[in-house]
């Protein structure tokens, strides 16, 4: 294959190349290192600017007696003009003979690192700018580490403003040596170090006579040398479920599962599974807007799917193919994280985590290692992760999540943490841990160790009441999906409480409306988990008091019951599953069809309580 030209002359000869591929590039670096000038110069040299734009900006500078800078071509946002810094990620477009480019200008100011993460998240290559007159600075290292964390391996370093150091080769060599050692430390081997002057145009699109000692590619030449990453269609199928749509007109009862395919391909008839719930089905059809029904869908597409059978799943699940390697599913994992929050990341505090389309509370179970990202030096014994630190931590989620490991599939291993309604940290899952609720179990163990019992023991209550305490949970259909089924389960729970009370048993029924109204309220993931914790604590008190504690939990799944079993220790759960419930692995003590008569449903629960010696073996 012919190597791409290092000069622009061949590129501009080609004009519009409809067959060229596209490459998504991010440009990063410390504030004022000249990223915007580099982009402006590239746009001008490649003819990508609107007609007359360059002359207009030059004229405006002349009217204001202001020296022209190529960076002014990008300074269109009012906040950027007033503050003199790039605060958001701007997207620009240009082309060469080889391909079309999308270039993302990532903010360099230390306060806007989270925007840099957004700009680099989908990039396929990176340009990292360093000011030759200033040398390698802390944000140069931070940005380099972030590129590594996001899995970018095609990186070129631009040593800009060489005109300010008289094109001194020694300055270039010193920066190259220092930054190359750093990048290798974080696992990235830069493809090139290019000495440039964006203001003068040196080594941007054509080789400069001012740097005869430099024999490498120009910036545009290096961009054309970058390879398009391998097609992710050959990887196992992964699609985070972003939403489920229902149609009601003309008796259309379809449920369409929608999302954007991250990797792989899928066809009509394929067996698929949704994780972490574990529910499976086959693809009945692939849907799209204003198109004939396709027979397959691939990475990058955003189709909808109908399933056979039409199972109920939630937003945030990960759709995978049954015949391919499955992702990891669990609650505990080791991750590397870059923290950008104003307050430190600390163990014991819950943070909303977004991974794929899933949103779930997470907390730090253990801080294994903390690095100063600017110097890449270890900080021993640190028990919190401060702003701009890099850390290796063990995290535990409030409910199971499904994801991949970064070394296998980086795209589905990335996550962000939210603090005070902003992205405060970005990380990648490096190793799967054991499933379960280790942090929660530890807290329950500590609670039981410190528990102060009263004078009346559980044995005394059993003798007096004639039964043990028990937590009876009616697992009902989700109220939004089957309101009639959810109401029927609540009615049966109330009837059971009355039946037991009439039989002189000590019982108490709790309506979940007393804690919260809707388990599926958007944006209330933290409240949902807090409410479950509250319910578990109430159940522990009620069962310790020897009561038959009864409640209905609409839309509960295996993870909810697992958490309640931990919280209710040392007492046990008694589960009654009603109708089209959400349980996959849990084995309920009683299964009730939604069409069961009220008296029969209650009698079946009473019979099961009797058979398991929860209540005495005589009629009530």
Image: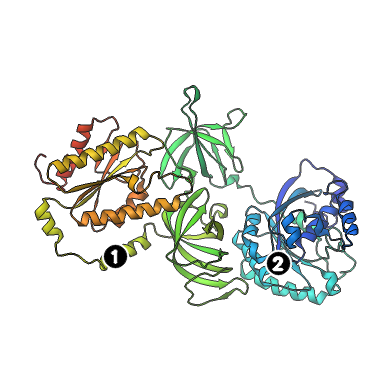
Q: Which residue corresponds to the image point at 22% horizontal and 38% vertical from the top-left?
A: 495
Along the line of sight, the residue nearer the viewer: 37 or 529: 529
Kindly tell me whether residue 323 is visible in this rendering: no
**Residue 36 position in % (x across, y down):** 77, 59
**The C terminus lies in quadrant:** top left
Please determine whether, in this image, residue 483 is positioned above or below residue 60: above
Residue at which label 2 appears? 30
**Residue 240 position in % (x across, y down):** 52, 45
**Residue 123 position in % (x across, y down):** 66, 54
Density class for disc 2 (Cα within 10 Å; few <14, some 14-19, many ≥20) is many
Please determine whether, in this image, residue 152 is positioned above or below residue 470: below
Question: What secondary structure is found at the residue carrying circle 2?
Answer: loop
The structure's colour scheme is rainbow
* Disc 2 from disc 1: Cα separation: 49 Å
Residue at which label 1 appears? 447
Tell how many labels.
Answer: 2
Along the line of sight, the residue nearer the viewer: 117 or 88: 88
């Amino acid at each position: 294959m012919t190597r791409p030209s290092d000069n622009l002359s061949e590129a501009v000869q080609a004009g519009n190349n409809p067959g060229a591929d596209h490459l998504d590039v991010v440009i990063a670096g410390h504030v004022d290192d000249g990223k915007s000038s580099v982009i402006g110069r590239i746009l001008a040299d490649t003819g990508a600017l609107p007609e007359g734009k360059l002359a207009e900006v030059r004229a405006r500078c002349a009217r204001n007696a202001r020296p022209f800078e190529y960076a002014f071509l990008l300074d269109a946002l009012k906040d950027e003009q007033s503050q003199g810094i790039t605060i958001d990620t701007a997207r620009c477009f240009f082309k060469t003979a080889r391909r079309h480019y999308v270039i993302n200008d990532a903010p360099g100011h230390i306060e806007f690192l989270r925007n840099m993460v957004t700009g680099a998240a989908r990039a396929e290559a990176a340009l990292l700018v360093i000011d030759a007159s200033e040398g390698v600075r802390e944000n140069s290292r931070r940005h380099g580490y972030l590129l590594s964390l996001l899995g970018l391996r095609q990186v070129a370093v631009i040593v800009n403003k060489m005109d300010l150091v008289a094109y001194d080769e020694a300055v270039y060599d010193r920066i190259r040596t220092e930054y190359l050692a750093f990048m290798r430390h974080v696992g990235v081997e830069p493809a090139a170090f290019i000495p440039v002057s964006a203001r003068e145009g040196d080594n941007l699109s054509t080789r400069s006579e001012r740097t005869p000692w430099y024999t490498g590619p120009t910036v545009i030449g290096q961009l054309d040398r970058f390879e398009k990453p391998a097609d992710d269609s050959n990887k196992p199928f992964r699609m985070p479920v972003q939403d489920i749509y229902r149609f009601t007109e003309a008796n259309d009862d379809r449920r369409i599962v929608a999302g954007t395919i991250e990797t792989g391909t899928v066809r009509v008839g394929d067996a698929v599974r949704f994780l972490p719930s574990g529910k499976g089905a086959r693809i009945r059809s692939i849907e799209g807007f204003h198109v004939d029904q396709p027979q397959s869908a691939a990475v990058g597409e955003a189709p909808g799917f109908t399933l056979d059978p039409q199972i109920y799943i939630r937003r945030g699940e990960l759709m995978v193919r049954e015949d391919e390697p499955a992702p990891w599913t669990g609650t505990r994992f080791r991750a590397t994280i870059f923290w950008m929050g104003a307050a430190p990341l600390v163990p014991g505090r819950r943070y909303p985590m977004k991974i794929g389309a899933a949103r779930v509370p997470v907390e730090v179970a253990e801080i294994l290692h903390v690095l100063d990202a600017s110097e890449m030096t270890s900080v021993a014994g640190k028990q919190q992760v401060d702003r701009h630190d890099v850390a290796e931590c063990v995290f535990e989620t409030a409910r199971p999540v499904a994801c991949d490991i970064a070394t296998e599939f980086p795209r589905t291993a990335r996550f962000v943490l939210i603090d005070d309604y902003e992205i405060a940290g970005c990380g990648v899952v490096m190793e799967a841990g054991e499933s379960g609720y280790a942090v929660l179990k530890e807290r329950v163990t500590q609670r039981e160790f410190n528990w102060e019992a009263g004078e009346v023991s559980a044995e005394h209550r059993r003798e007096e009441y004639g039964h043990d305490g028990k937590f009876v949970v009616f697992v009902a259909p989700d109220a939004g999906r089957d309101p009639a089924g959810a109401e029927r389960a609540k009615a049966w729970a109330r009837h059971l409480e009355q039946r037991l009370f009439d039989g002189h048993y000590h019982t108490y029924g709790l309506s979940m409306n007393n804690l919260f109204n809707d388990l599926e309220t958007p944006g209330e993931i933290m409240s949902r988990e807090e409410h479950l914790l509250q319910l578990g604590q109430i159940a522990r008190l009620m069962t310790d008091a020897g009561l038959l504690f009864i409640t209905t939990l609409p839309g509960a799944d295996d993870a909810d019951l697992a958490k309640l079993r931990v919280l209710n220790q040392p007492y046990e759960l008694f589960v009654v599953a009603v109708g089209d419930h959400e349980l996959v692995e849990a084995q309920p003590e009683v299964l009730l069809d939604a069409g069961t008569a009220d008296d029969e449903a209650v009698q079946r629960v009473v019979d099961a309580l009797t058979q398991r010696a929860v209540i005495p073996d005589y009629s009530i």
